[in-house]
C-alpha cells in the first residue's frame, strides 16, 4: 500500500454521480426516470450545469462538453428520446446510440466485447443503460445472490480503464410502503455495487423528486424537486426529505382518502335537513367512528370547494357556529 497513490473521489455530477463508477437510478413507471437521464445526458453533452447541481451563486461548473452513449430498449429514439434530449438542452452531435432495430443491439450486454469495443473507440464520459434487464447476459439469474455483482463487475473495469461513468436504470419494487434499499427491484446486488443510488418519485401536485439514498464518497446530497410540465426538467428547489418521507406520506394519504370521502358524504347527507350547529355535527361524526383529524380535513375540503358554509349567531359568550349546505353551489 505504500506505493498506492491516494486520490480524492471525482464527480461527473457533483455529489450525485461519482466519475468512473456505477450509479443506479430507480423509480416507478411514470416517475420521470427517462426525462431525468435525458437531462443528465444533456448537461454532460453540452458542458452545462446539471439540474442536480444546485451550487451557490459564486460557484460554477467548469466542464468540457463530453460524449454520452445510451442504450434504451424501452423508448424509441425517433419518437421519444430525441425530443426529450433536445428539450433538455442536449448537444445532439455528442449523443450516441445503437438503434433498437439494429441487429447489433442484442449483442450489447454488460460483459460483451462489443460494448468494450464501442467504449474504447468513442471514449464517452457517460454510458446509460435503460433498463438494466435488457443488458444482462442470458445465463444470469437476477434473483440469485451475487449473480448481479458478477454481471456488473465488467463495468467497474471499463470505468477504471476508460474513465467512463455508468448510469443504470432500474425499476422499483411493486410492493407499497417500501423505501430506500428495499425499493430496488430484482436484486440487492444492484444496490451494493452502485456507488450512488438515486430514486425518482412523485411528491405532490405535479412535483417530483430525486432522492439520493446511497453515497459511498460523501454525505447523501439533498433531495432535488422538479416538474415535467413542459417536457423538460424544471428545477423547483431542494429539501431534506428523503424517499421514505414521501413514501410514508403517500401511503398515509391513500389510507386516509376513503375515510375522508366517507366523512364528506356523511356531512352533506346530514345537512340535507337544514343547518346544524357545528358541535352537533361533530358529535354525530365522532359517533360514526370518524377521527377528529379526518373530520376537520373533510369540513375544510367541503368549505374550500364551496359546498358548505358557516354562519355565526349570537354575541359574546353566546356565539354559536352553524354549518349548512351552500344553496348557490347546489343550484349551480
Image (cartoon, grey):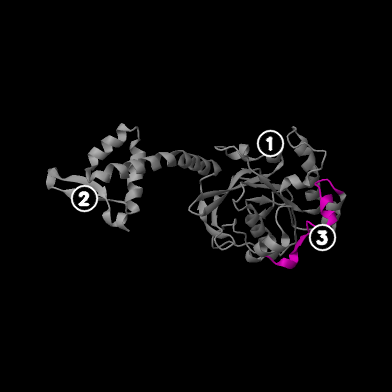
The residue nearer to you, when weighing 249 against 329, is 329
Q: Position of residue 208 (x, y in %)?
A: 54, 52
If the image is split into quadrants, where does the C terminus sit? Answer: bottom left
Q: Position of residue 28 (x, y in %)?
A: 61, 46
Asked if marks 3 and 1 touch (Cβ < 8 Å), the reply is no
In this rendering, the label closer to the viewer, 3 or 2: 2
Which stretch did the figure color magenta?
90-112
Q: Secondary structure at mark 1?
A: helix
Q: Which mark is residue 122?
A: 3
In this rendering, the label closer to the viewer, 3 or 1: 1
Residue at 30% over, 36% down: 285
Residue 44 visible in this rendered orientation of the protein: no
Question: In which quarter of the view is residue 217 placed?
Answer: top right
Residue at 85% over, 48% down: 112
Residue with the mark numbered 1: 188
Q: Secondary structure at mark 3?
A: helix
| Mark 1 to mark 2 CA distance (whole Å) | 59 Å
| Mark 3 to mark 2 CA distance (whole Å) | 73 Å
Question: In which quarter of the view is residue 84 placed?
Answer: bottom right
| Mark 3 to mark 1 CA distance (whole Å) | 31 Å
Residue with the mark numbered 2: 311
Asked whether residue 83 is drawn in magenta, I would say no
Residue at 63% over, 52% down: 33
Amino acid at each position: 500500500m505504500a506505493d498506492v497513490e491516494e486520490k480524492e473521489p471525482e464527480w461527473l455530477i457533483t455529489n450525485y454521480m461519482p466519475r468512473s463508477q456505477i450509479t443506479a437510478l430507480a423509480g416507478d413507471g411514470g416517475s420521470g426516470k427517462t426525462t431525468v437521464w435525458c437531462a443528465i445526458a444533456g448537461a454532460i453533452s453540452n458542458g452545462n450545469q446539471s439540474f442536480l447541481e444546485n451550487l451557490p451563486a459564486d460557484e460554477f461548473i467548469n466542464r468540457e462538453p463530453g460524449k454520452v452513449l445510451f442504450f434504451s430498449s424501452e423508448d424509441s429514439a425517433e419518437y421519444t428520446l430525441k425530443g426529450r434530449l433536445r428539450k433538455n438542452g442536449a448537444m445532439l452531435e455528442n449523443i450516441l446510440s445503437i438503434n433498437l432495430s439494429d441487429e447489433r443491439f442484442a449483442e450489447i450486454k454488460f460483459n460483451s466485447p462489443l460494448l468494450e469495443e464501442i467504449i474504447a473507440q468513442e471514449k464517452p464520459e457517460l454510458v446509460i443503460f435503460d433498463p438494466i434487464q435488457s443488458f444482462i447476459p442470458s445465463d444470469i439469474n437476477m434473483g440469485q445472490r451475487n449473480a448481479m455483482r458478477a454481471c456488473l463487475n465488467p463495468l467497474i473495469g471499463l470505468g477504471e480503464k476508460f474513465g467512463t461513468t455508468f448510469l443504470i436504470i432500474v425499476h422499483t419494487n411493486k410492493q407499497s410502503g417500501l423505501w430506500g434499499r428495499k425499493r430496488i427491484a430484482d436484486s440487492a446486488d444492484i444496490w451494493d455495487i452502485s456507488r450512488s443510488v438515486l430514486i425518482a418519485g412523485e411528491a405532490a401536485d405535479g412535483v417530483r423528486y430525486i432522492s439520493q439514498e446511497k453515497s459511498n464518497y460523501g454525505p447523501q446530497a439533498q433531495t432535488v424537486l422538479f416538474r415535467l410540465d413542459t417536457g423538460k426538467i424544471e428545477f423547483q428547489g431542494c429539501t431534506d426529505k428523503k424517499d421514505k418521507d414521501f413514501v410514508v406520506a403517500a401511503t398515509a394519504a391513500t389510507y386516509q382518502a376513503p375515510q375522508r370521502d366517507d366523512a364528506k358524504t356523511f356531512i352533506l347527507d346530514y345537512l340535507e335537513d337544514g343547518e346544524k350547529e357545528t358541535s352537533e355535527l361533530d358529535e354525530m361524526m365522532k359517533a360514526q367512528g370518524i377521527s377528529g383529524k379526518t373530520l376537520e380535513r373533510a369540513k375544510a375540503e367541503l368549505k374550500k370547494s364551496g359546498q358548505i358554509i358557516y354562519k355565526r349567531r349570537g354575541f359574546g359568550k353566546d356565539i354559536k357556529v352553524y354549518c349548512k349546505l351552500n344553496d348557490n353551489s347546489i343550484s349551480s
